[in-house]
Image (spheres, rainbow, N blue to C red):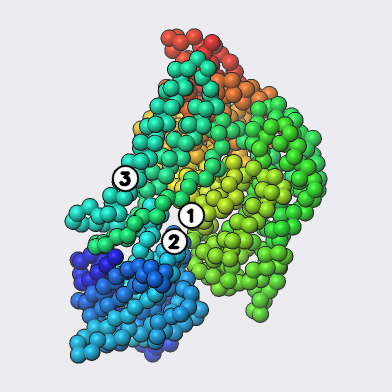
């Protein structure tokens, strides 16, 4: 592979020469320029590492750097050759990438000659000057399992070259385009890699067609087996998710001359269940206070099963600084404020006996340290996973981590874990597998997944092979002047992007649907429940089989009440999510409230009509005071004070009626 980066205005890979002045310089500037300086500084920071300097001048230069990559089977190395016509001494400040993100890491030794270690974060190699002509070059031997070579150029103490404020990035030979996270532009004839990907995606399409034929053949048999059809549907969905990840994948935007073979795609995990799941959140914010929650829930297991729940989500099981469990400390210590490890095992066993799967609430984004470092900062961990500060991200200002920059948003109350570290990922995968084997969990509820890249989640799910997994990707919806926007596509796109980053192997809580329902019911604006294309406006309208719909949980409701659903209108919310596609989740507080019988009736209706996460929906009305829809041509529903009756063409019978909601089914 060969990549050319021209250093000129308007060309592919336009680069800028940025002259930097250190903060200790005698040069002074007017206070009025501070905002301009701050903006330039923000735009000039290197991605993989940075030191803060004030920008003095930015100019364009007219040179180029060429990088070529070839595989050497004899040494099992990628040979990266770098050549530039830049004059003078040129230092390559470089690192490697080991995952699908662009986190700077140090490669294994040996290093090229004239190489120095920089702050244990990167390497600096002086290129060898060409004799009798301008320019210089260098060569780097890198392992096959690395995914990228990342670098910037250093001309002197004050001059750096980078790609429009970003690092140069070159994918290494043998790295699959299906897994790369950058965009690629090709010119000329179709490459061998294009043909390989086309052949592979054609294979997916053919396989989907065969599976569809399998469904048709099943339907023609009198002894039709619904379980077989659902199994085929699941396989189609996984293949489609895999094809979608290839479609969404981005690869580097340079011209590629020679491309090596594509690695086989990674398998899609089975963490999406059967499609007929109905989830119960089996705790609230106060459940820890009795100290015997596992025992109390043990007594309700048969009742929850009789109500029609198929999956229960249990609270975080580990030793924790906070009694609720969301500030974990010693991950292998499962004696918590909810009960001890033996009571937890007994509870999981009981749920299995009554036919309910169990999700463990795992907090992977952050972990509370047990010891201070030499500066008095809590970033040294104890217990079986006795990590040091290399496990903490470097850009969390509170905890002085020595890891790489975070791949997501930081949670500032505890050290944020650096999932780009191989030893961290290894330990987490072993811990999840231990939880499955030792406790019997069937899957995971993943806390604060905004904090780390979804590709790491896929790695963890591939290792632990859960029956079902759901991530909490919760951020703010779109508002204008305090009013919620009708179009929430950007919000649900962020959730869908996270699901896609997991390879479709996990679902996500449909926070978009929760927010839109909240606004529609609170303000009597039921028109909000249809998007511009006549579909449900949340994740359930785009990727229903990965949408976990809910109206309340331990954060939004309970005694926390961060985003409480409009009071007295909860049953309208449940009439919506329990009749619609997606996987509905019911909050424990509502099960033990006066809503219990109405919720039970809606679950029973959903089950007997076999409504599932992929069911079809036709929105019949979305007006100011009423919303109505027909699901799978078997169930009709309406919420709101306005009028709606299903058409008389089918034999509809009113099945459930409550405060401003009605549900019909075909007789």
Residue 446: x %, y % from top left:
59, 49
- Badge 1 or badge 2: first in the primary sequence: 2
Q: Residues within 10 Å of mark 3 (few under 14, many from 20)?
A: few
Left or right: 368, with 268 as reference point: right
The residue that appears at 62% across and 22% down in the rendered structure is 604
Element marked by disc 3: helix
In the rendered view, would you say 285 is above or below 538?
below
The residue where tag 1 is placed is 455
In the rendered view, would you say 664 is above or below 337?
above
Left or right: 601, with 207 as reference point: right
Residue 186: x %, y % from top left:
24, 56
In the rendered view, would you say 476 is above or below 112?
above
Please state, as top left, top right, bottom left or bottom right, where the C terminus lies in the image: top right
Q: Residue furthest front?
A: 74
Residue 502: x %, y % from top left:
48, 49
Q: Which mark is residue 199?
A: 3
The residue where tag 2 is placed is 101
């Amino acid at each position: 592979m060969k990549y050319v980066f021209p250093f000129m205005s308007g060309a592919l890979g336009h680069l800028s020469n940025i002259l930097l002045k250190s903060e200790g310089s005698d040069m002074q500037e007017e206070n009025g320029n501070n905002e301009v300086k701050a903006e330039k500084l923000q735009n000039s920071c290197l991605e993989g590492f940075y030191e803060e300097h004030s920008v003095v001048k930015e100019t364009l230069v007219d040179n180029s750097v060429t990088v070529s990559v070839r595989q050497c089977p004899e040494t099992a190395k990628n040979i990266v050759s770098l050549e530039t016509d830049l004059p003078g001494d040129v230092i390559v400040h470089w690192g490697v990438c080991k995952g699908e993100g662009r986190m700077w890491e140090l490669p294994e030794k040996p290093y090229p000659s004239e190489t120095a270690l920089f702050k244990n974060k990167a390497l600096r190699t002086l290129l060898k000057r060409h004799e009798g002509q301008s320019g210089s070059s260098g060569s780097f031997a890198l392992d096959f399992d690395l995914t990228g070579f990342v670098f910037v150029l250093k001309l002197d103490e004050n001059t750096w070259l980078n790609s429009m404020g970003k690092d140069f990035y070159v994918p290494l030979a043998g790295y699959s385009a299906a897994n790369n996270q950058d965009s690629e532009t090709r010119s000329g004839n179709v490459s061998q890699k294009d043909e390989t990907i086309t052949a592979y995606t054609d294979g997916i399409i053919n396989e989907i067609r065969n599976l569809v034929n399998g469904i048709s053949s099943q339907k023609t048999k009198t002894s039709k087996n619904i379980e077989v059809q659902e199994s085929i549907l699941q396989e189609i969905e996984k293949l489609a998710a895999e094809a979608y990840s290839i479609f969404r994948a981005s690869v580097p935007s340079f011209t590629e001359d020679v491309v090596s073979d594509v690695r086989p795609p990674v398998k899609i995990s089975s963490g999406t269940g059967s499609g007929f799941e109905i989830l119960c959140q089996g705790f609230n914010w106060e459940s820890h206070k009795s100290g015997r929650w596992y025992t109390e829930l043990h007594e309700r297991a048969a009742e929850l099963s009789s109500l029609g729940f198929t999956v229960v989500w249990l609270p975080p099981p580990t030793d924790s600084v906070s009694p609720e469990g969301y500030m974990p400390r010693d991950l292998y210590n499962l004696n918590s404020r909810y009960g001890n490890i033996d009571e937890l095992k007994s509870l999981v066993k009981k749920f299995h006996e009554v036919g309910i799967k169990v999700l463990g609430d795992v907090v992977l984004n952050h972990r509370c340290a047990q010891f201070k470092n030499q500066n008095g900062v809590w970033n040294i961990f104890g217990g079986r996973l006795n990590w040091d500060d290399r496990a903490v991200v470097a850009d969390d200002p509170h905890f002085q981590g020595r890891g790489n920059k975070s791949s997501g948003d930081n949670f500032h109350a505890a050290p944020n874990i650096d999932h780009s570290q191989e030893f961290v990922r290894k330990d987490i995968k072993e811990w999840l597998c231990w939880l499955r084997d030792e406790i019997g969990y069937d899957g995971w509820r993943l806390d604060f997944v905004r904090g780390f890249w979804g590709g790491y989640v896929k790695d963890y799910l591939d290792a632990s092979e859960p029956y079902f997994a759901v991530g909490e990707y919760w951020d703010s919806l779109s508002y204008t002047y305090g009013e919620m926007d009708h179009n929430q596509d950007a919000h649900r796109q962020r959730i869908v992007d996270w699901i896609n980053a997991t390879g479709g192997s996990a679902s996500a809580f449909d926070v978009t649907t929760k927010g839109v329902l909240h606004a529609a019911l609170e303000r009597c604006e039921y028109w909000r429940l249809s998007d511009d294309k006549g579909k449900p406006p949340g994740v359930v309208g785009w990727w229903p089989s990965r949408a976990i719909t809910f109206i309340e949980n331990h954060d939004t409701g309970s005694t926390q009440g961060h985003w409480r659903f409009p009071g007295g209108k909860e049953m309208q919310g449940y009439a919506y999510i329990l009749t619609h596609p997606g996987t509905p989740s019911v909050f424990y507080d509502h099960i033990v409230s006066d809503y219990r019988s109405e919720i039970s009736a809606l679950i029973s209706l959903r089950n007997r009509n076999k409504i599932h996460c992929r069911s079809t929906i036709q929105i019949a009305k979305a007006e100011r005071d009423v919303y109505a829809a027909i699901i799978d041509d078997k169930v009709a529903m309406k919420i709101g004070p306005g009028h709606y009756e299903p058409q008389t063409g089918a034999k509809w019978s009113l099945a459930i009626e409550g405060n401003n909601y009605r549900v019909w089914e075909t007789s």
